[in-house]
Image (tube, helix red, strand yellow):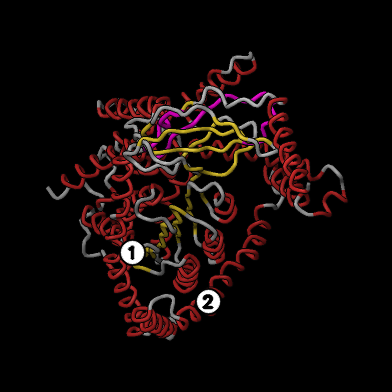
């Protein structure tokens, strides 16, 4: 009697579950497709399916996959209802995968979609989403190269006055008159960072002038590779000026790779040697104000320059002159007045004009309800 | 030849590295990562050279009895101790870790904490209301500082929203302007390097 009652109960529960599934119209996920993820390195496959109606009773999806004729395996977590895409990033190259999307209800009833065709992940040689960026890069590059050749033809190129660079001669002259040294810090940047290379160019120009005036130039370095390159830059500058006898290799030296040990070391040099002029050019972080304030306290004329917008306020507050952002990169052209370098600056300005026109045009179009330029820029970013 | 080979290599690797940013293919990414890892090979050689210069500089200081020459002995004591423990036993050795955590870390923290005092002295000079611009800076700084502390909203309920407006509008616009200029400057500088117009990294000269 008890067994019969149990059987009736089990049958009732089963009927109720099936009934609920059918009453809620539980249908398999439709239009399931699996494609090789575009613009990736071939390490993923994207699965798409249609969204289920709100009253379908589906509470989540489970993705299943199989390699060739292998067993079905569940991948990833249960996806919440409303999901229509899943990127399988756990594939192995060379294998073809087929997928099934399993819809799951609150009562854990399930229904499977049809199996997709097998797909392989392949890496693309060109990221099509980056076409606008590639075109922008080509346009900007062409503008710079064209202006370099324009400058080579001997035509005059106007360059606005940069007070921080005008003051370079003043600072070196002051140090020479006072019979004190000049301290030049390239900051914490490594040799493969563009601000460091820009700083080396300025250092080369400063070294040419100190070679002429026989003013000691001290360069404490944080990076060993930078130190070796800087030695070569300074040595070449002294050779070019015909003063190899004035060059002292020991004036370009390594302090420490540790950020604050470097700051402490350079601060110590400032306080002991009291240089008349201090150049802080390159990549700086939290030590920027520690260096600049110490330099200020000894009364040195200070010319700073960095592209880090977080450190600029500190330099502006504590130094006599500051090269703001792009002025650091304009310094080599400004100081050397080489036509080819000046030409590249003109090309850079063309790029800025193009960006401003795009911004103004974008604002006008967006206000008029046309948003293709915004979408294009979003794709670029 | 001494100049031409590095310039040709710079051009080829420069262009190839730019192209890898537009190609997600595994070969392209492998090339990018491989080339970047080559820097690691150069670093140890340069570090040896740098350490030699450091030792030489401090030996000279001791020999010439320059000002505070005695401190150079501390440099040697630190260098020898860390090398003597770190090289045979590795950086995970308890004594090495103890020295790092109890000497270098507190010294770094001490230098970093000096920043608070330097900010105060730099701010004092920058915010002296001697011109219209400095007054504007002073007023803006007071609003932002008050907006960052609870007492600001107690003085005037709109302080926080004013601070946020300053940070979101004039401040962010200026920062983005600088970033835009810097980005174009970096691209321009990179093109000059790749084309061999900028040669400072080769030691300058022609």
**For residue A78, side relative to residue B189 (left or right):** right
| Disc 2 target residue | B101
Find residue B103 and name its label.
Answer: none
Q: Nearer the viewer, residue A110 or B203?
A: A110
Q: Are marks 2 and 1 on the same chain?
A: no
Res. A293 in view: yes
Quick one: A21 or B141, which is closer to the camera?
A21
Relative to B72, A105 lies left or right:
right
Residues A243 and A113: in front is A113
Tell which subunit mark 2 falls on.
B
Residue A250 place in picture, x, y as percent: 30, 70
Residue at the (61%, 68%) spot, across then down: B113
Q: Where does residue B202 sit, x and y in percent of width and height?
A: 25, 51
Q: Nearer the viewer, residue B81 or B203?
A: B81
Mark 2 Cα shell of 10 Å, populated few (<14), some (14-19), many (≥20): few
Residue B59 sits above or below residue A111 on the image: below
Query: The disc numbered 1 marks a residue on which chain?
Result: A
Q: Secondary structure at mark 1?
A: helix
Which residues are drawn in magenta?
A34-60
Q: Residue A40: within the magenta?
A: yes
Question: Count of labels shown?
Answer: 2
Report the residue marked by disc 1.
Answer: A224
* Image height of B197 relative to A136, above or below: below
Horizontal and vertical percent position of residue B39 = 30, 56
Residue found at x 78% / y 48%: A2
Task: Identify which residue is drawn at 65% across, 53% down.
Answer: B126
Q: Nearer the viewer, mark 2 or mark 1?
A: 2
Q: Secondary structure at mark 2?
A: helix
Q: Is residue A351 visible?
A: no
**Which image quadrant is residue A117 in?**
top left
């Amino acid at each position: 009697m008890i067994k019969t009652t149990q059987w009736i109960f089990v049958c009732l529960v089963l009927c109720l579950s099936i009934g609920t599934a059918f009453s809620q119209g539980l249908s398999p996920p439709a239009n399931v497709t699996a494609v090789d993820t575009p613009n990736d390195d071939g390490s993923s496959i994207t699965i798409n399916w249609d969204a289920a109606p709100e009253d379908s009773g589906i509470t989540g999806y489970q993705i299943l996959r199989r390699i060739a004729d292998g067993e079905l395996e569940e991948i990833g977590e249960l996806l919440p209802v409303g999901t229509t895409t899943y990127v399988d990033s756990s594939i192995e190259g060379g294998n073809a995968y087929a997928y099934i999307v399993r819809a799951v209800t609150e009562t854990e009833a399930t229904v499977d979609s049809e199996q997709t065709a097998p797909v392989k992940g392949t890496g693309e040689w060109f990221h099509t989403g980056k076409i606008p960026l590639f075109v922008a890069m080509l346009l900007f590059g062409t503008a710079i190269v064209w202006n370099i050749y324009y400058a080579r033809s001997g035509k005059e190129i106007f360059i606005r006055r940069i007070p921080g660079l005008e003051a370079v001669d003043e600072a070196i002259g002051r140090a020479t008159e006072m019979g004190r040294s000049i301290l030049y810090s390239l900051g914490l940047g490594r040799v493969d960072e563009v601000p460091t290379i820009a700083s080396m160019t300025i250092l080369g120009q400063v070294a040419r002038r100190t070679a002429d005036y026989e003013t000691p130039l001290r360069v404490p370095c944080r990076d060993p590779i930078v130190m070796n390159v800087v030695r070569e830059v300074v040595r070449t500058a002294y050779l070019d000026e015909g003063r190899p006898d004035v060059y002292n290799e020991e004036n370009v030296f390594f302090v420490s790779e540790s950020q604050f040990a470097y700051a402490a070391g350079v601060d110590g040099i400032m306080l002991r040697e009291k240089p008349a002029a201090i150049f802080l050019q390159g990549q700086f972080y939290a030590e920027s104000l520690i260096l600049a304030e110490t330099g200020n306290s000894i009364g040195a004329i200070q010319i700073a320059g960095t592209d880090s917008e977080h450190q600029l306020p500190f330099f502006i507050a504590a130094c006599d002159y500051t090269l703001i952002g792009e002025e650091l990169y304009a310094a080599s052209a400004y100081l050397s007045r080489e036509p080819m370098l000046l030409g590249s600056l003109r090309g850079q300005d063309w790029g800025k004009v193009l960006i401003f026109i795009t911004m103004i045009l974008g604002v006008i179009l967006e206000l008029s309800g046309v948003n293709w330029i915004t979408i294009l820029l979003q794709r670029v970013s | 030849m001494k100049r031409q080979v590095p310039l040709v290599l710079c051009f080829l690797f420069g262009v190839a590295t730019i192209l890898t940013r537009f190609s997600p293919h595994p070969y392209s990414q492998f090339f990018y990562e491989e080339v970047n890892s080559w820097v690691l090979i150069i670093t140890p050689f340069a570090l040896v050279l740098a350490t030699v210069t450091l030792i030489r500089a401090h030996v000279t200081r001791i020999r010439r009895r320059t000002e505070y020459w005695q401190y150079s002995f501390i440099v040697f004591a630190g260098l020898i101790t860390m090398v003597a423990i770190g090289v045979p036993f590795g950086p995970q050795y308890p004594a090495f870790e103890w020295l790092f955590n109890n000497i270098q870390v507190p010294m770094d923290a001490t230098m970093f904490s000096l920043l608070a005092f330097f900010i105060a002295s730099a701010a004092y000079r920058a915010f002296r209301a001697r011109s219209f611009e400095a007054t504007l800076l002073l007023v803006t700084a007071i609003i932002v500082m008050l907006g960052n502390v609870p007492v600001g909203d107690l003085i005037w309920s709109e302080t926080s929203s004013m601070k946020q407006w300053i940070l979101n509008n004039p401040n962010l616009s200026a920062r983005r302007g600088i970033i835009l200029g810097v980005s174009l400057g970096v691209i321009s500088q990179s093109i000059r390097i790749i084309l061999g117009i900028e040669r400072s990294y080769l030691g300058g000269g022609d």
